[in-house]
Image (cartoon, helix red, strand yellow):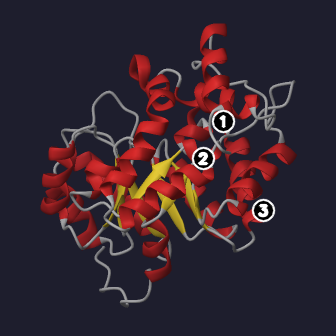
Amino acid sequence: MTYPAPHPEQFAAQRTALADVVAIPVTPYAADGTVEEETHRALVRRLLDGGVRTLTPNGNTGEFYTLTPEERRTVLELTAEEAGGEAEILGGVGHDVPTAVEAALHAQRHGATMVMVHQPVHPYVSQLGWLDYHRAIAEAVPELGVVPYIRNPQLSGERLAELGESCPNVIGAKYAVPDAARFAAFSRDAGLHRFVWVAGLAELYAPSYFASGATGFTSGLVNVAPGVSRGMLDALRAGDYPAAMKVWEQIRRLEDLRAADSSANNVSVIKEALWALGLCRRDVRSPAASLPDEQRAEVAAIVKGWDI
């Protein structure tokens, strides 16, 4: 199936929303391990009040792969209801194609204007299979903006170009391969101006990726300190790289803790920081784990030193 070319303004609002801080909200848990709905609403409200205008419920910082299908629907609904039109909703979808399509249609019914498609989880991912997977999802929701989450360094930019050619609702890419030179090549091979490029490795990689064409970045840190993330975006938009690197230096230790051991504590560090601020419990679901005591103390000290 080949779509006609979209109207130039069809996805204008969504493209603008991607060229921003794309927040990945955490999923807070109650003492019994269930999703704590009121805390979730409060954390989303804090993001909105902090100037965040793009939200990705069911992202990796939200522990997408540990949530049940019902919980993923709940997280999407809570986020959309609390946002109430104040932010664009970029719902995370994935797993098998029927599950991803069902989740995308559910997101659309509840006000999402875009979906972010998680990297396919399979031991054998071919480039043609990647293309077929994303095409099937995009064709099922032609009115939604679709954003592939690219973590596979073997994927070529030409494959994304093919996807964009057949599915005009594929409007951006969350690029999360930790290689700035590869990103520069990939984005140009795919079409630098055809897609909105989101630096998918957050603030630490944002300056180098912005230098090569990214205009937005994802963030889990924004849950803790919305003003810090907004400060980096403002500096990057102004082309003030020294100012952006001052933010980089400020957040470096916390982000290094998140990145250690192949990002084993990516979510745990964010939840620990939120716990230190009295905003939610520190619990994460296996196969992640809460931080050891010495790292808990370090995270609390870092957060205490910030003006939040």
Give the Cα separation between the discs numbered 3 and 1. 20 Å
On the image, the x and y values in percent for residue 184 come to: 17, 53
Q: Nearer the viewer, mark 2 or mark 1?
A: 2
Q: Which quarter of the rendering shows the N terminus? A: bottom left
Amino acid type of disc 1?
Leu
Where in the figure is residue 302, as x and y percent of width and height? Answer: 60, 28
The local secondary structure at tag 1 comes to loop
Q: Position of residue 19 (x, y in %)?
A: 42, 67
Q: Tell me the CA gap for discs 3 and 2.
A: 15 Å
Residue 82, numbered circle: 3
Q: Nearer the viewer, mark 3 or mark 1?
A: 3
Residue 146 vs residue 256, the one in the foreground: 256
Q: Are marks 3 and 1 in contact (CB under 8 Å)?
A: no
Q: Tell me the SS state at disc 3.
A: helix
Query: Residue 111 versus residue 199: which sits nearer the camera?
Result: 199
Q: Earlier in the sequence, mark 3 or mark 2?
A: 2
Q: Earlier in the sequence, mark 2 or mark 1?
A: 2
* Quarter of image, res 136: bottom left
Q: Badges 2 and 1: C-beta atoms under 8 Å apart?
A: yes
What residue is pinned by disc 1?
67
Q: Residue placed at 68% from the left, 36% from the top?
A: 68
* Mark 3 vs 1, N-terminal side: 1
Q: Nearer the viewer, residue 292 or 177?
A: 292
Q: Are marks 3 and 2 in contact (CB under 8 Å)?
A: no
Q: Position of residue 24 (x, y in %)?
A: 57, 48
Residue 202 seen in render:
no
Query: 135 left or right of 45?
Result: left
Tag 2: amino acid: Asn
Question: SS of the residue at dot 2?
Answer: loop
Q: Residue at x 25, y 73 (%)?
A: 194
- Rendered position, 14 above or below 176: below
